[in-house]
Amino acid sequence: MSERLELLRGVVHPWHHDHFGHMNVRHYAPFFDDATYHLWTRLGLPYSTMLPEHGVHTVTAQATTRFLRELKGGDLIVIDGATTRLGNRSASFLLRMLHADTGELHATYDLVEVFFDPKARRSAPMPETVRAKLAAHLVEED
């Protein structure tokens, strides 16, 4: 089993609040999306080299956010992630948004990424070199 990778740190600002006084659901998406960009680099597969070295890139096929605890202005967050499943043409990841001070879990982001051949404009098999790097970061889901 592998440890989760730290992907992103951030701060909740007052402009993230909704009329209830906590971070609105629309603001979770940018934090998780930015963390996903960092995920690939932390896995040793940066976007800048994925296509030239492996002939594919990935596209998000599904992203599901679970909101568990509210966040307020001034809260510091950390997002970590890990590989949870390897398919033939896709991989799944679980990202977690934690309070940086307390470690409390505030939200999760289940992500399915599909390998894509831009020339053929369709899904493609996961290259074995990519599979090996992802497998090194495979964890069981919580």
Image (cartoon, rainbow, N blue to C red):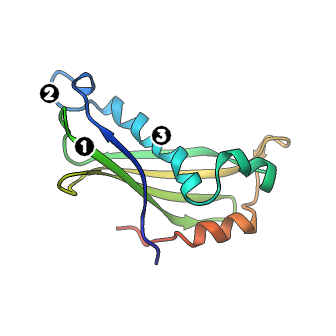
| Residue type pointed to by label 1 | Leu
Q: Residue at x 54, y 44 (%)?
A: 37
Image quarter of residue 25:
top left
Picture coordinates of residue 98, whole percent (x, y)? 28, 52
Foreground residue, 4 or 125? 4
Crowding near the residue tagged with mark 1, few <14, some 14–19, many ≥20 C-alpha atoms within 10 Å: some
Q: Residues within 10 Å of mark 3 (few under 14, many from 20)?
A: few
Please count the marks in the image. Answer: 3
Q: What residue is pinned by disc 2?
A: 21
The image position of residue 86, as x and y in percent, is 59, 66
Q: Is residue 19 above or below residue 141?
A: above
Residue 1 percent across, percent down from the top left: 46, 78
Q: Which mark is residue 26?
A: none
Q: Of discs 3 and 2, which sits in the foreground?
A: 3
Return the disc, 2 or 1, that comes first in the chain's sequence: 2
Where is mark 1, residue-wise? 76
Q: Pick whichever of labels 3 and 2 is earlier in the sequence.
A: 2
**Residue at 33% from the left image edge and 50% from the top image edge:** 78
The residue labelled by disc 3 is 34
Q: CA distance from mark 3 to mark 1?
A: 16 Å
Would you say the residues marked 2 and 1 are in contact, meaning their CB atoms lie under 8 Å apart? Answer: no
Going from N to C along the chain, the mark reached first, 3 or 1, is 3
Residue type, label 3: Asp
Q: Relative to 58, is 23 on the left or the right?
A: left
Tell me if 52 is positioned left or right of 43 in this view.
Answer: right
Q: Is residue 8 left or right of residue 102?
A: right
Q: Secondary structure at mark 2?
A: loop
CA distance separating discs 3 and 2: 24 Å
